[in-house]
Image (cartoon, rainbow, N blue to C red):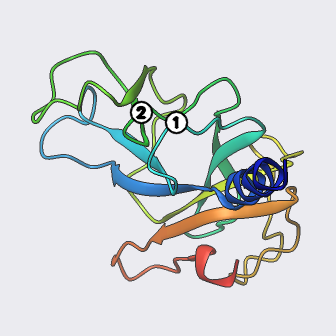
Amino acid sequence: FILSVCALFLSVIQSAQAAIKLNEIFINPPGTDQGQEFIELRSTTGGVEAMTGLKLIIIEGDTNGGVIDVVLDLDSFSTGTNGLFLWRDAASVISPAPEVATTLNVADFVPDIENGSNTYLIVSGFTGAVGNDLDTNNDGVLDTTPWTSVLDGVALIENDGASNWAYAASL
């Protein structure tokens, strides 16, 4: 009985510590973007992980940044048996093809992911919406954060000489 309770307790702890992370992002392929863009997420457990309550948000980082450009609802998805989840923008063939064990969602990014500076966040408890300005005074610091936690984040800064903001490092 004690061993069963200990094993159950350890599995609950491991489940609570499991997280979803950004694994790979491809937003500006050579030539046309359509059919080549994708965002890949991975489970830190390496296996199937439900993404209940999670959103992937993309925050504008160019001049007058801080505006939420895209919100991808991950709530009904889980990672595959290999721990991977791939959101692609079209069903056309990419090379190499994703592993069969990867959970695949084919849906166009609406609006399209911009090629400039952006911050990508996986969040839980999200209450915001596309178009919300999170950096109202455009100083590179988020003034509001409409989520309860950030699981992971990364920012891409364009080297174009303009003001560009990266919000992930501060979170």
Q: Residue 81 has which mark?
A: 2
Is 139 left or right of 63, judged from the image as shown? right
Position of residue 105 measured from the top left corner of the image (x, y, whole percent): 44, 22
Q: Residue at x 32, y 20 (%)?
A: 90
Binning the other alpha carbons within 10 Å of mark 1 as few (below 14), some (14 to 19) or many (20 upward) gives many
Whether residue 61 is visible here, answered yes or no, is no
The foreground one among 22 and 47 is 47
Q: Secondary structure at mark 1?
A: loop
Q: Residue at x 33, y 78 (%)?
A: 159
Q: Residue at x 38, y 83 (%)?
A: 161
Which residue is farthest front? 1
Q: Residue 125 appears at what percent x and percent y?
A: 86, 48
Depth order, front residue of 137/144: 144
Helix, strand or loop under label 2: loop
Mark 2 is on which residue type?
Answer: Thr
Q: CA distance from mark 2 to mark 1?
A: 5 Å
- Residue 14 appears in which quarter of the rendering? bottom right
Q: Earlier in the sequence, mark 2 or mark 1?
A: 1
**In the image, farthest residue toward the top:** 91
- Say which quarter of the image contains residue 160: bottom left
On screen, residue 63 above or below 28: below
In the image, which disc is placed on residue 120?
none
Looking at the picture, tell me which residue is in the foreground, 22 or 12.
12
- Picture quarter with the C terminus: bottom right
Q: Which residue is mark 1?
A: 48
Q: Position of residue 168 (x, y in %)?
A: 60, 74
Mark 2 Cα-neighbour bin, 10 Å: few <14, some 14–19, many ≥20: some
Query: 98 left or right of 115?
Result: left
Q: Are marks 2 and 1 in contact (CB under 8 Å)?
A: yes
Q: Quadrant of residue 54?
A: top right
